[in-house]
Each structure stands twice: as C-alpha cells, then as structure tokens.
Amino acid sequence: MTDAPARLAAFLEDLEQARQARDVTVVVVTKFHPAELVRELAEAGHRDFGENRHPEARDKALGLAQLGLTWHFLGQLQRKKARQVAAYADVLHSIDSIELVEALEGGESPHERPVRDALVQVNLTDDPGRGGIDPARVEALAERVAASPALRLRGVMAVAPLDEEPGRAFERLATHAERVRRLDASADWISAGMSADWREALQHGATHLRIGTAITGNRPAGG
Ligand SMILES: *Cc1c(COP(=O)(O)O)cnc(C)c1O
C-alpha cells in the first residue's frame, strides 16, 4: 500500500471546497508509477487516469483492462504511433495538427475503429517547439477534428507556460475554449491545471484537472 489513496481523498476534499458546484473530472496522472498504484486508486473508487508516454500507457491500460477504467493520453502524439495509442486511450488530450488527425483516420476499416474523445491542445507559449497548436489555428484544427469519423471534438487542453503567471495563461485558454464552443456547443471541456496550478485553472473554467504528484507522491527516478 502507498499513501496515494489518502492523498486522493485529501485532494478531492480540497477540490470540493474550491469547485463551486461545477462538475470537474480529476485525471490522476500515473506516469512512471507502477500499475499497482493505479490499481490501489481504482480500488479507492477512482476511474480516470492519465499517461503521457506510449508504450508505458499501453502496458498499464491493457494490464488493467478488466477494471474498466477511462484512460487519458496526455503526451505528444507521434503520427506513426497515433493509431496504436487510440487503440487503448479513451481520451486524446494532445491533438495538435491536422496531419495527426489524418494519421488517426488511417488503417483499419471505419467500423472497427474506435471513435475517441479528442481535445485540441493549444500552445500558450511563444515557443513553437512546445506541444500544442498556434492559437491562430485553433478553429481550423477544431473544425477538422469535428468532421473526423475517428474523433469526437470535446474541447481544448493546455499546459501553463513556466515563465508566466498561470492564471493569465488560463485566462487566454478560456478565450480559445470559447472559440471552439462557438463551432460546437457540446465541445465544452477544458483540460487544464496540474498539481501546482489547478486552483488557477479551476478559476478559469477547467473541467478536467490533470493531477500527478499531489496524489501519487513524487515520481520514481526518471520521472
Ligand atoms: C505529468 C503531467 C501532469 C501532472 O503533473 P503534476 O505536476 O505531477 O501534477 C499533467 N499534465 C501533463 C500533460 C503531464 O505530462
């Protein structure tokens, strides 16, 4: 046993105080931790888990498949691995190019392909090398996702830049989320906020918090 279940309970209590009646999904990020930790949290009643690397994510999702958990893929998605990830990940948080959408549409015949929930990842930094699409191209990508038979457009995702007050960055993300909602009113998810900045994310409308260390404890070496 680890103390992760107790941390989860404490986190959910803090969230209960802060969330003001809005529905919020906590995605517990378990990267670098063993599948056993996921199992403990599942036994404590948690359903949503996030990973950012294939094949680590695949091994956990397949190893624990009988638990019926919801798996969120958070990391940069390589085109050539995209369909492998979509085979087990229920929600893809990091859709950041039209080429990636095309890659997800390839391969097996359409009726065998799972339709996955998808978020357009927005780059809130000035560095094009960081994950996410340039905010100027958010609508074009969101329209392409909405039209894709492989994906269901759900909203937007972002990581706050390291060199900016997170509340300001999440305020911008809220405007991008609104642009996407104007295209599709049902695409109202905002995936934002990690252990250090979830309160700011919540203030700016986050519907999905991605929480690692605050619940799992420090990641093992390498993480
Ligand atoms: C690791 C990770 C998180 C969780 O980070 P913590 O600071 O441990 O809460 C959230 N989002 C993404 C995309 C991550 O890679």
Image: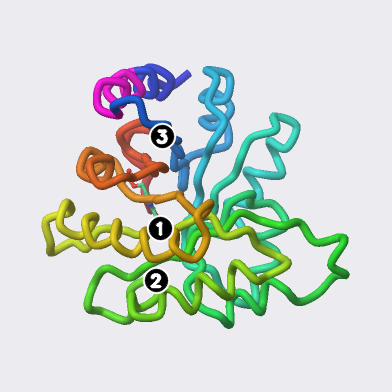
Query: As displayed, is residue 159 above or below residue 62?
Result: below
Q: Earlier in the sequence, mark 1 or mark 2?
A: 2
Mark 3 closeness class: few <14, some 14–19, many ≥20 residues within 10 Å: some
Quadrant in which residue 208 is drawn: top left
Q: Which residue is mark 3?
A: 24
Relative horizontal placement of residue 29, taking residue 54 as reference (left or right): left
Q: Which one is closest to the eye, mark 2 or mark 3?
A: 3
Give the alpha-carbon distance from disc 1 to disc 2, as whole Å: 8 Å
Q: Residue at x 53, y 54 (%)?
A: 154
Q: Residue at x 57, y 30 (%)?
A: 47
Q: Horizontal and vertical percent for residue 176?
A: 34, 64
Mark 1 closeness class: few <14, some 14–19, many ≥20 residues within 10 Å: many
Q: Which residues are magenta?
A: 10-19
Q: Earlier in the sequence, mark 3 or mark 1?
A: 3
In this view, the residue in front, 113 or 155, is: 155
Q: Is residue 141 magenta?
A: no
Q: Earlier in the sequence, mark 2 or mark 3?
A: 3
Q: Cβ(mark 1) to ligand 1 < 8 Å?
A: yes
Mark 3: secondary structure: loop
Relative horizontal placement of residue 16, taking residue 188 as reference (left or right): left
| C-beta proximity under 8 Å, tags 1 and 2 | yes
Q: Horizontal and vertical percent for residue 213?
A: 33, 38
Relative horizontal placement of residue 16, taking residue 2 as reference (left or right): left
Quadrant in which residue 35 is drawn: top right
Q: Which residue is mark 2?
A: 132
Mark 1: secondary structure: strand
Q: Residue at x 76, y 56 (%)?
A: 114
Q: Type of residue at label 1? A: Met
Q: Cβ(mark 3) to ligand 1 < 8 Å?
A: no
Q: Type of residue at label 3? A: Val
Q: Which residue is mark 1?
A: 157
Task: Look at the magenta stretch and give its main secondary structure.
Answer: helix
